[in-house]
Image (tube, rainbow, N blue to C red):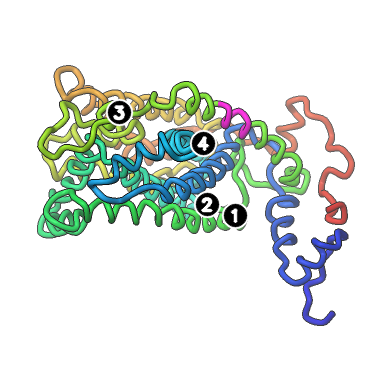
Amino acid sequence: MAGLHKSQFQNPLLNWIDSRLPIPSLMYKEYAAFPTPKNFNYFWNFGALAMVTLVIMMATGIFLAMNYQPNTALAFGSVQHIMRDVNYGWLIRYVHQNGASMFFIVTFIHIFRGMYYGSYKAPRELLWILGVVILLLMMATAFMGYVLPWGQMSYWGATVITNLFSAFPVVGHGIVTWLWGGFSVSNPTLNRFFALHYLLPFIIVAVVFLHVWALHITGSNNPLGIDVKSPQDTVPFHPYYTAKDSVGICAFLTFWAFLVFFAPNLLADPNNFIHANPLQTPNDIVPEWYFLPFYAILRSVPNKLGGVCCMFGSILVLFFLPWLDTSRVRSARFRPIYRQVIWVWVLATVVLGVVGAHKPLGFWVPLGRLCTVYYFFHFLVLMPLLGVIERPLPLPESISRAVLGKGGGPMPSGAAATPMEKA
C-alpha cells in the first residue's frame, strides 16, 4: 500500500507493525545486524551491564516511591514500613540500595576501559563527553537518594555536602539556600531531593540514548584501537555479542543477588539506621564508598574553596581528556609507558578512596595530598607529555589479521549477517 514502510519481516504480526511503525527494522539494524569489531573482550560487557542496572534501578525505584513519604516526620518510618509490611518490600529496597553500588562499579570499570583503550579519542570525543555527563547525573541522583531514608548519615551528609557550595564567593550562600528551600536541611530539602531523585533517572535515560546514538554513528572502538578496514574485521552484534553479554549479565546478577540475600547491609552505614537528629552530630560523617576518592581530594586541600574546586575539577578534567591526551595511538596495548602509568593512576584513585574513609589525621593527610597531586599530574602533565616522548609499538595491519594471527580460524559461512526473514 502507498505510504507504508516496506517491511522485510515474514512474521505476519511483525510485518504488520513494522510496515506502519518501523521500530522492529530499526532495532534489527542497530542491535542485530549492526557491524561490530570481532575482537571485543569482556571489558566491552560493562556498557550493557550499566544499561541493565539502570532499568532495574528505575523499576525498583518506582515501586519504592509508591510507599515512601517525603516528609521529615514520616520518611524514616515509611522506609521501615516498606521493609516490614509491604509485600517483598525488603527485597525491592535491598535490590535498589545495593544497585547504587553495582551501578557505580560497572560504570567505573566502563570508564577505565575507555581510558585504557583510548575510546575517548577522535572521532569519539562527543561520545566520551556524554558518558561523563551520565557520570555526573549518576552522582547527583545517588547523593539525593542517600538523603531519602532520613537517617543520621542522610541528614548530616546532606548538610555537609550542600554547605560546600557556600565556599563560592557572592553566589555560594544563595545556592545553598535554594538547595535547602530555607535556612537549614529540613522538609523542603527532603521534598526537593525526592522530586529530583525521581526525575534524574529519566534524564539519564535521555542522555544514554544520545550516548548510544553517538556510538552507532562513530562505531565502537576495540582493544587494538585501530579502525575497521574491511567487512572481515566485523561481525554482526547478534548473535555473537548478545551471547557474550548474556554470560556477563548472568555473572553480574549472581554477584548482585549474593549481596542482596547474604550481605544486604555490607556497604551501608550503621548511623543511617538511626532517625535523623539535627541536635546530635555523628562522630564520623563519611559519604558512600563511590564518593570517597573525591571526598579525600576535598579534604586534602587546606583551603575550603580550593578543596571544593579540586573536588569538582577531578571530575570536570575528564571532559577534556580527548584533548589532553596528545598521543596518536589509542590503545594502551601499543603504548608501553602509558600502559604502566594508567595503573599508577588507578592505584592513586583507590588509595584516595581508602584515605577518604579515614579521619584526616596523621599519615593519612600527606598520603591523601600526594595522591591528589598525582591524580591531577596524570591528566594535566603526564598525558600531554607522553604524546611527545613516548614511542608507540607498531600497530597491526587490521583487526582480522591480528585475530587470525592468534590462532583464529576463518569465519563460518553465513556469519556476516542474520537474515531478517528468519524473524
Q: Nearer the viewer, mark 3 or mark 4?
A: 3
* In magenta stretch: residue 47: no
Q: Nearer the viewer, mark 2 or mark 3?
A: 3
Alpha-carbon distance for marks 4 and 2? 14 Å
Left or right? Give the position of 201 relative to 292: right
Q: Nearer the viewer, residue 323 or 302?
A: 302
Which numbered disc covers residue 218?
1
Badge 4 local density, few (<14 within 10 Å), some, or many (20+)? some
Label 1 close to label 3 by CB (< 8 Å): no
Residue that numbered label 2 is attached to: 124
| Helix, strand or loop under label 3 | loop
Badge 1 local density, few (<14 within 10 Å), some, or many (20+)? some
Residue beneath the point at 35% across and 36% down = 80
Residue that numbered label 3 is attached to: 269
Residue that numbered label 4 is attached to: 113
Alpha-carbon distance for marks 2 and 1? 6 Å
Which amino acid does the dot numbered 4 rest on?
A: Arg
Pinpoint residue 307: horizontal percent, then vertical percent.
Answer: 18, 40
* In magenta stretch: residue 249: yes
Q: Nearer the viewer, residue 333 or 223?
A: 223
Give the magenta range.
248-254
Left or right? Give the position of 413 relative to 95: right
Which amino acid does the dot numbered 3 rest on?
A: Asp
Which amino acid does the dot numbered 2 rest on?
A: Arg
